[in-house]
Structures are given as structure tokens and as C-alpha cells.
Image (tube, grey):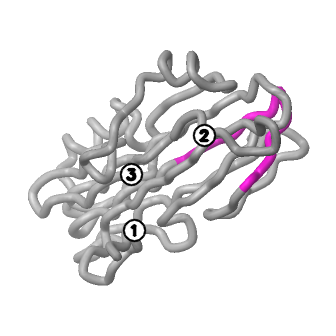
Amino acid sequence: PHSHRPRDDNPIRGYGDLVALGDAVEEELELLDVVDASGVPFVKQMLDGKSGLMWPTSAANTPIELFEARTPAVCVEKAYLPDSGGAGKYRGGMGVLRDYRINADDVTVSLASERQNVAARGLEGAGAGHAGEFIYNPGKPDELKLPAAAGEVVLPRGSVLRIATPGGGGFGDPAARDAAAVERDRREGRTRP
């Protein structure tokens, strides 16, 4: 069978996350929607990596409004992750942060992700991309980093699930990056000052 695991011949690709959101109905798990199936492909040797692309390319990007109408969750934040693409002459693509607030009792999710334990490394002296992560209640006293793969994680009403997709690794020595590109990265929020 085909595997989406990182391979040595493809070191700078940021692989995505798959999160299935369900609800317990009469002791059976009813799949309500796939929350996220995205990641960041590798950079090309002459261009920066693309940010927040769907991977594999046949995956659908469900509009948030449709997702919210079909599930007991609301997206409270969706943004590119600054500094998540690896530094390089050509930067890796940025990952995406999504925070979902749960609006029902005891919603069950299943989590599966690549590139949470091993970041997409850069090539030719470039930096690695930021690893992805799942966070329960980010910024709250009971914040908890969830595992990269878990089945039947129960989320109570009012809790927040953060999905941060991995960034791609860069290509080439970061010191060789054009000064105008570095300034554009800061101005556009790709990097933090």
C-alpha cells in the first residue's frame, strides 16, 4: 500500500494532518467531517515554497462556513504560521494554524498526522520547517499537546482544538537570500521581526 510517510528522497516536504471529527450517536461513531487534510509541499530550487497547500493535491478544501454548518465546531482562528517555513535562499512554505471551538457535549475526534515528530529538513544549508502539532485548549491552564496519532479523543463543550500544519524545509544558504525578499518576508508576516 502507498504510504504518506516522509522519505529520505523527499526531505523538505511538510506532510499534513488528517483530523476526523465525529459525535457519539447511539454508541456508534458518526463521521461528521474531515477537519483538515493539508500540508506544505517542498520548495523548488528557484522559488519559495507555497504556503498552506492541500496535500495530496486531490484533497478538497472545505469552506469553513460549510464545515461549521455540518459539525459541532466553529473555527475561531485560521492563519498562516509565521516562521514555520524553513529559512533558506528560498524559504519553505508556511504551515497553517486552525483553532476550532467545540459546541456540543463530548465530541470525539481521531487524529493522524505526519511531520510532528520529525520536521521537514532543509537542503543545501537551509533550515528545517516547523513541525506540526495538535494542541488541546491552547493558552489555557489545562493546555495539552496531543499525540500525532490518536483515536477517540473526547473533547468537551467549550474546549478548543488547535491544528498546526507543518512547514516545508528551505533550500540553500539563508545568508544568500536576497535582501528585498527578507524585507518582503517581514512585511507580509512570513517571518517575525
Q: Residue furthest bottom?
A: 8
Observer-nearest residue: 130 or 68? 68
The question of residue 80 being in magenta is answered with: no
Neighbour tally class for label 3: few under 14, some 14-19, many 20 plus, Cα within 10 Å = many
Q: Which residue is mark 3?
A: 39
Q: Which residue is mark 2?
A: 31
Above or below for 6 versus 64: below
Q: Which of label 2 and label 1 is nearer to you? A: 2
> Visible in this render: residue 193?
no
Neighbour tally class for label 1: few under 14, some 14-19, many 20 plus, Cα within 10 Å = many
In which quarter of the view is residue 168 placed?
Answer: bottom left
Residue at 27% of width from left, 74% of height from top? 10
* Residue type highlighted by circle 1: Ala
- Percent from the top left, x then y, of residue 153? 76, 51
Q: What secondary structure is marked by label 1?
A: loop
- Percent from the top left, x then y, of residue 159? 80, 33
